[in-house]
Amino acid sequence: MITDSGNPLTLSALNGLVRSVVEEGLPLRYWVTGELSEVRATSVGHCYIELVERDELTGEMVAKARGTIWSRVYSLLRPYFLEQTGREFSVGLKVLLQVTVKFHELYGFSLDVCDIEPAYTIGDMARQRMLIVKRLTDEGVIDLNKELPFPLLPKRVAVVSSASAAGYGDFCDQLNNNMYGFRFAVSLFAAPMQGNKVEEGIIAALDAIASDAIPWDVVVIIRGGGATSDLSCFDTYDLANNCAQFPIPIITGIGHQRDDTLLDIVAHTRVKTPTAAAEVLIHTMLVQADRVASLQQAISEAATRTLTDERHRLQSLLHRLPSAATLLLQQQRHRLDIYEERLKAYSPDNILAQGYTLTLSGGRIIKSAAELYEGDTIVTRFADGETISEIIDTKVKEYDE
């Protein structure tokens, strides 16, 4: 229909024409992909969304459309989507929706959502996780926290959790009431465990732990319970990167049964529940306690064996002592006999018996003719007696120089 300025259309009439064209030209249901940029559920059960398309290289928005999921449909799609993906219908998700195209004279262009294909979202979520894992791997940080040595005695424990979380209470009860009497120093660094503040809160808590004056042995991030749909907040690059490079071993006990989150993947140790996280610490202490007990037993047994061996050695020495003493006496007697023979060989009587004489004057032995003078009386001693003489003259032998 062509009109001129003399017969103008009202806006509603024009929009009515557009509506007719749209509904007649696009009468079928169409599958369309896009990213949820807005999700708003109403008190009467409807859900209003905004679907956008972004350029894959620049991320800039290239298309946008409003959509409505009426209550009769949303009441079925929401639990189905949550069951299949583990995620609430929320902003940032890539979705594949079946829609009909609508145009309203007052509200303009929109899409009525008839159905959803969760597999598409699951695939996109997996792709995003895979890209983050690849990035962390390429950057060489994905295993850094895992490679840290776990403390032998993890007594100083920094906990990142919500202060009101039941899981935090369960964790503390399990530690404080352990049957072995181990004592732990536990401090809470509060952070939200669900919602869009999780990434920011956990990173801030880790920064506080790293800068704290206390040298913490281990960090435990626990959640405990809660909807599975809230786990997407643990699948971000920044959170995973911070945990992967944290200088203290991290234990995660987020309390879910499904596949690991990115936070679980980069953490040193991953368990399912806060209680299990406490058991890891208790078991580690128990291993060391058993090791100390084993060492004490080994030392005691070694000391006992040493004392027994020394006692046997002493008894053996005592039994051998009489024989040893006899042998020693014989050896000493033989030495004395040798010395006695040597003394006899060098005794004056033995020397005189060989034809030598001994000259004395005034009771002292004369060793040189120069010691005697004319008129001196000398005694000459032989082996069989002695003679007394008077010196008439002395002749001293002169040596050439």
Image (spheres, rainbow, N blue to C red):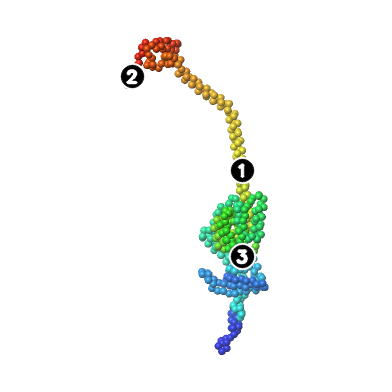
Q: Which mark is residue 296?
A: 1
Residue identifier under label 3: 195
Vertical order, 184 against 202 (above or below): above
Helix, strand or loop status at disc 1: helix
Where residue 126 sits in the image (x, y, percent)?
A: 57, 64
In the image, what residue occupies the spot 61% across and 43% down? 296
Whichever of callouts 3 and 2 sits on the residue coming sooner in the sequence is 3
Q: CA distance from mark 1 to mark 3?
A: 51 Å
Q: On the rendered image, what quadrant is the N terminus found in?
A: bottom right
In the image, what residue occupies the spot 59% across and 34% down? 310
Vertical order, 101 against 156 (above or below): below
Where residue 294 sits in the image (x, y, percent)?
A: 61, 44
In the image, what residue occupies the spot 62% across and 71% down? 40
Vertical order, 80 against 155 (above or below): below
Where residue 388 sits in the image (x, y, percent)?
A: 42, 10
For the residue pair 167 and 132, the one nearer the viewer reads as 167
For the residue pair 143 and 220, the one nearer the viewer reads as 220
Nearer the observer, disc 3 or disc 2? 2
Given contact means CB atoms under 8 Å apart, are the residues at marks 2 and 1 in contact?
Answer: no
Given contact means CB atoms under 8 Å apart, are the residues at marks 3 and 2 in contact?
Answer: no
Whichever of callouts 2 and 1 sits on the residue coming sooner in the sequence is 1
Residue identifier under label 2: 399
Say which amino acid is labelled 3. Answer: Gly
In-image side of 55 versus 391 (left or right)? right
Say which amino acid is labelled 2. Answer: Tyr
Which residue of the protein is positioned furthest toward the bottom in this rendering? 6
In the image, what residue occupies the spot 40% across and 10% down? 389
Label 1 crowd bin: few (<14), some (14–19), many (20+), radius 10 Å: few
Quadrant in the rendering for residue 247: bottom right
